[in-house]
Image (cartoon, rainbow, N blue to C red):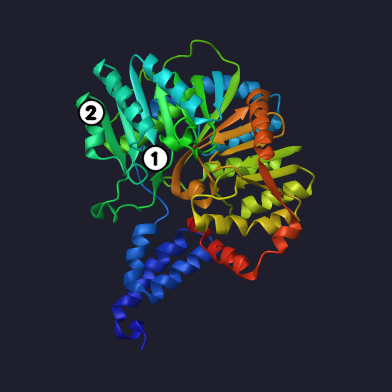
């Protein structure tokens, strides 16, 4: 006998929750799956839903004053895009969703290894005179993690305002003892969405701050794929990762500062002061156009996903993607395939062996249909490649923290920098070609010859793609 015949009140309960889920306008498959769970496992299903079901995290925002400065400066950035209609349309996607316009950067520096990225980061922190804002998904208590902690403590003792924001899951390996020198020096440390039983009723446990972000004196900013861990540096780890990070200076840093202010407000419940010190006027106008795009589960807009989608559809000559986790939704999969079918040189570079067996299996389930559509798929063989980049034609590129998967686009708080112009594009393209030298291209015959057990495992893992 079904539970709905034994517990009449449960019928009302299921109906109410079913209405809530339907009104969330999820993809049809996801909606049906949740309805089945709540119908046949009502009480267990409720517990699961409270942990990983809600789509949106509600948090207070503080944008107005800093956004006014960004919009005013963005007028000049948009003016420089007026000569290229496609660039202007791409920029308008994020703007239309409430994001920042392209802003002028005085300098854009790209790093393709941890040693150079950390050296530049440490130099910027040493030069800071007013504040250093740091937000990381992963911070390991290893050599580089300890060195950064000690440097920040030194700056805090010298009177610089140091604020450190750590993800409640990714950086959970940091102990109270490890952070004690920071706090004793006067630095402020806060945790983003820590996993606690009392908070599960308010928000999902797996809404993570996957950003990597540092802002020094409001004028120098860092973002990209690198966390704080020895495995990013060839000087500190034998099996180091290949990754890409970037440094910005000038007005283009302001949106990074805004993102930190909002994340800090959510985690620490502190309103940081907006002034010419935290959002300083640029020393020079700059010649690099950069648009910072932020997304997260506090909005259903999926801004970074839409920016990728638009970029792919606008590509005319080449589209070179690097990602450690490749689990695209139907829209992005179709966009990549149709771009290749209309003659664009579409390439996808992934690690031969990732750090998640489940994600690897799911990713490889997409390769046969991509190759069938003339997309070229490569596996990077020397080590794990963690870079999240896209090279489009000769004058658009993306560097960010977001992987090419549903988790990054819809469930995690992420950042992406859209770089307009030939300079950064050429440097990223040159690195891409170097990476291909150490990669193996997957052919159609090889993919079709995979054993049934392997293909079944990939297809099964793909069923979980909305959560990966």
**Vertical position of residue 392 compared to residue 70: above or below:** below
Q: Would residue 177 appear left or right of 457 to someone viewing this image?
A: left
Q: How many marks?
A: 2
Q: Position of residue 209 (x, y in %)?
A: 40, 42
Q: Would residue 315 appear left or right of 145 to someone viewing this image?
A: right
Helix, strand or loop for disc 1: loop
Dot label at residue 138: 1
Residue 221 vs residue 330, the one in the foreground: 221
Q: Which quadrant would residue 165 be assigned to in this image?
A: top left
**Vertical position of residue 375 compared to residue 127: above or below:** below
Q: Is residue 56 visible?
A: yes
Seen from this angle, which residue lies furthest front? 238
Seen from this angle, which residue lies furthest bottom? 1
Helix, strand or loop for disc 2: helix
Neighbour class for label 1 at 10 Å: few (<14), some, many (≥20)? many
Q: Is residue 71 visible?
A: no
Q: Position of residue 287 (x, y in %)?
A: 60, 16
Neighbour class for label 2 at 10 Å: few (<14), some, many (≥20)? some
Q: Position of residue 62 (x, y in %)?
A: 36, 32
Q: CA distance from mark 2 to mark 1?
A: 19 Å
The mark nearer the N terminus, 2 or 1, is: 1
Q: Which quadrant would residue 443 be assigned to in this image?
A: bottom right
Q: Would residue 343 appear left or right of 105 to someone viewing this image?
A: right
Seen from this angle, which residue lies furthest left? 184
Contact, mark 2 vs mark 1 (Cβ under 8 Å): no
Question: Residue drawn 53% across and 44% down?
Answer: 403
Quadrant of the image containing the N terminus: bottom left
Residue 186 vs residue 93, the one in the foreground: 186
**Vertical position of residue 28 compared to residue 147: above or below:** below
Residue designated by label 2:
181
């Amino acid at each position: 006998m079904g539970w709905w015949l034994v517990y009449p009140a449960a019928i009302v309960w299921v109906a109410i929750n079913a209405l809530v889920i339907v009104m969330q306008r999820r993809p049809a498959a996801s909606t049906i799956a949740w309805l089945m769970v709540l119908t046949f496992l009502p009480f267990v299903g409720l517990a699961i839903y409270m942990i990983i079901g809600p789509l949106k995290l509600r948090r207070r925002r503080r944008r107005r004053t800093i956004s006014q400065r960004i919009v005013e400066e963005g007028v000049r950035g948009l003016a420089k895009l007026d000569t290229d209609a496609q660039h202007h349309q791409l920029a308008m996607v994020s703007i239309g969703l409430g994001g920042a316009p392209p802003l002028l950067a005085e300098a854009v520096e790209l790093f393709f290894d941890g040693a150079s990225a950390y050296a530049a980061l440490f130099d910027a922190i040493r030069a800071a005179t007013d504040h250093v804002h740091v937000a990381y998904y992963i911070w390991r208590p290893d050599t580089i993690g300890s060195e950064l902690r000690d440097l920040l403590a030194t700056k805090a003792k010298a009177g610089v305002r140091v604020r450190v924001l750590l993800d409640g899951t990714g950086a959970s390996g940091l102990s109270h003892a490890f952070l004690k020198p920071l706090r004793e020096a006067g630095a402020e440390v806060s945790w983003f969405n820590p996993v606690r039983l009392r908070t599960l009723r308010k928000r999902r446990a797996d809404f993570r701050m996957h950003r990597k972000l540092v802002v020094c004196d409001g004028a120098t900013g860092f973002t990209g794929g690198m966390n704080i861990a020895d495995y990013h540096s060839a000087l500190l780890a034998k099996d180091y990762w290949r990754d890409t990070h970037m440094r910005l200076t000038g007005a283009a840093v302001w949106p990074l500062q805004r993102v930190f202010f909002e994340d800090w407000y959510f985690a620490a419940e502190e309103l940081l002061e907006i002034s010419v010190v935290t959002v300083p006027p640029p020393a020079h106008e700059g010649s690099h156009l950069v648009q910072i795009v932020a997304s997260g589960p506090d909005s259903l807009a999926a801004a970074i996903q839409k920016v990728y989608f638009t970029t792919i559809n606008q590509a005319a000559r080449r589209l070179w993607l690097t990602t450690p986790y490749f689990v695209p939704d139907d829209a992005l999969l179709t966009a990549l395939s149709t771009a290749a079918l209309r003659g664009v040189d579409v390439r996808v570079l992934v690690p031969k062996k990732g750090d998640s067996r489940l994600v690897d299996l799911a990713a490889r389930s997409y390769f046969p249909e991509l190759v069938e559509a003339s997309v070229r798929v490569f596996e990077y063989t020397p080590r794990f490649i963690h870079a999240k980049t896209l090279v489009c034609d000769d004058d658009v590129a993306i560097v960010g923290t977001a992987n090419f998967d549903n988790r990054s686009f819809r469930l995690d708080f992420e950042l992406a920098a859209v770089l307009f112009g030939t300079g950064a594009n050429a440097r990223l393209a040159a690195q891409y070609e170097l990476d291909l030298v150490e990669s193996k291209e997957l052919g159609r015959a090889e993919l079709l010859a995979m054993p049934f057990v392997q293909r079944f495992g990939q297809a099964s893992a793909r069923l979980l793609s909305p959560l990966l």
